[in-house]
């Protein structure tokens, strides 16, 4: 057996254990209720501690009562298996969508750009972890940052290595229903990273050519890197699976910076986007006032006419 055959056999074994779990998490998307937001804006895990009180799990009910139909938790892999199961069960009970979590994002090392057996061994362990998380709570989207670029290697070789490594990762997760989402980040806040732009991520995803390799479009990062947000959404639409939000400058709620979120949200609504829009940003005010201002900001941005 060569390595690909071994990997495929192992992946099929993982997938066999997960497929039953995938079907158990599959559910018809509930229709929005009166008072719901038009799109699935996703507060972060633990948000609304001042307004709702209680523990993060109990705050999910408050989010749903406010009209939010999604939630994201970047640190989901760090939760205990028991908590992951509780989160999944509560989200399913409330009819909420779980946004992407961070599976791998080491900004300090060269990984995906290398053709290296140890790197692939590490990545396979991460992929196995994503399948287990999927089984426990139905978290379909696992966020991946391909790491740093290599100044000693031609850019085209690095790109080819990233593509090959992503295909290797897809072999391990695709049949289990996990989708890897690649996040380009701006080079001013995160210098030295390989992936920085939506067109670049689009090119990589097209080359990987797998349904389990898509893009998370972080509008905060892309406003800094390239702007032209709506045209880039349209150009890369076939490869975009989900979004991160945050106004610029400041990385706070809509209305605090220069991005016209009302127009972007209307555009996404008209494109029939039904995934999570992760509210991956801070608040311009503190305590209860800040949490209420957050809700009000999304009400304002969501008030576009349909």
Image (cartoon, helix red, strand yellow):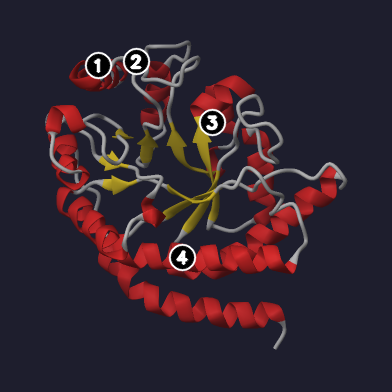
| Circle 3 or circle 2, nearest the eye | 2
List the residue tagged with mark 3.
233
The foreground one among 93 and 193 is 193
List the residue tagged with mark 2.
284
Residue under the point 46% across and 16% down: 250
| Marked residue nearer the N-terminal end (1 or 2) | 2
Marks 1 and 3 sit apart, C-alpha to C-alpha, by 27 Å
Residue under the point 19% across and 49% down: 95
List the residue tagged with mark 1.
293
Residue count near mark 4 (Cα–Cα under 10 Å), binned few <14, some 14–19, many ≥20: some
| Marked residue nearer the N-terminal end (4 or 2) | 4
The image position of residue 67, as x and y in percent, is: 18, 32
Helix, strand or loop at label 2? It is: loop
Residue under the point 26% across and 67% down: 24
The foreground one among 248 and 234 is 248
| Marked residue nearer the N-terminal end (3 or 2) | 3
| Circle 4 or circle 3, nearest the eye | 4
Marks 1 and 2 sit apart, C-alpha to C-alpha, by 8 Å
Residue under the point 42% across and 79% down: 16
Per the rendering, the mark at residue 129 is 4
**From what the image shows, is residue 250 above or below residue 72?**
above
| Marked residue nearer the N-terminal end (1 or 3) | 3
The answer to whether the residue labelled 1 contacts the one labelled 2, judged by CB atoms less than 8 Å apart, is yes
**From what the image shows, is residue 64 above or below residue 86?**
above
Marks 4 and 1 sit apart, C-alpha to C-alpha, by 37 Å
Residue count near mark 2 (Cα–Cα under 10 Å), binned few <14, some 14–19, many ≥20: some
**From what the image shows, is residue 249 above or below residue 174?**
above
């Amino acid at each position: 057996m060569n390595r690909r055959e071994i990997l495929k056999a192992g992946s099929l074994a993982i997938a066999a254990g997960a497929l039953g779990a995938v079907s158990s998490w599959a559910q018809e998307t509930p229709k929005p209720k009166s008072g719901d937001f038009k799109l699935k804006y996703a507060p972060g895990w633990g948000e609304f501690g001042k307004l709702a009180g209680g523990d993060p799990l109990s705050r999910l009910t408050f989010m749903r009562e406010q009209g939010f139909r999604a939630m994201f938790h970047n640190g989901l892999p760090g939760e205990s298996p028991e908590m992951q199961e509780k989160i999944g069960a509560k989200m399913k009970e409330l009819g909420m969508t779980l946004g992407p979590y961070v599976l791998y994002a080491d900004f300090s090392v060269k990984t995906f750009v290398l053709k290296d057996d140890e790197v692939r061994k590490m990545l396979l362990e991460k992929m196995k972890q994503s399948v287990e998380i999927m089984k426990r709570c139905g978290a379909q989207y696992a966020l991946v940052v391909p790491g740093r670029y290599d100044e000693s290697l031609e850019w085209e070789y690095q790109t080819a290595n990233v593509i090959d490594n992503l295909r290797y990762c897809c072999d391990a997760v695709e049949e289990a229903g996990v989708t890897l989402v690649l996040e380009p980040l701006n080079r001013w806040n995160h210098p030295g990273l390989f992936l920085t732009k939506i067109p670049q991520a689009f090119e990589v995803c097209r080359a990987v050519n797998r349904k389990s390799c898509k893009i998370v479009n972080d509008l905060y990062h892309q406003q800094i890197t390239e702007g032209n947000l709506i045209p880039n959404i349209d150009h890369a639409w076939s490869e975009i699976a989900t979004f991160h939000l945050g106004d610029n400058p400041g990385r706070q709620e809509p209305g605090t910076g220069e991005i016209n979120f009302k127009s972007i949200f209307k555009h996404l609504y008209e494109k029939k986007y039904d995934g999570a829009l992760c509210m991956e940003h801070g608040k311009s005010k503190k305590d209860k006032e800040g949490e209420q201002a957050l809700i009000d900001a999304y009400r304002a941005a969501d008030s576009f006419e349909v």
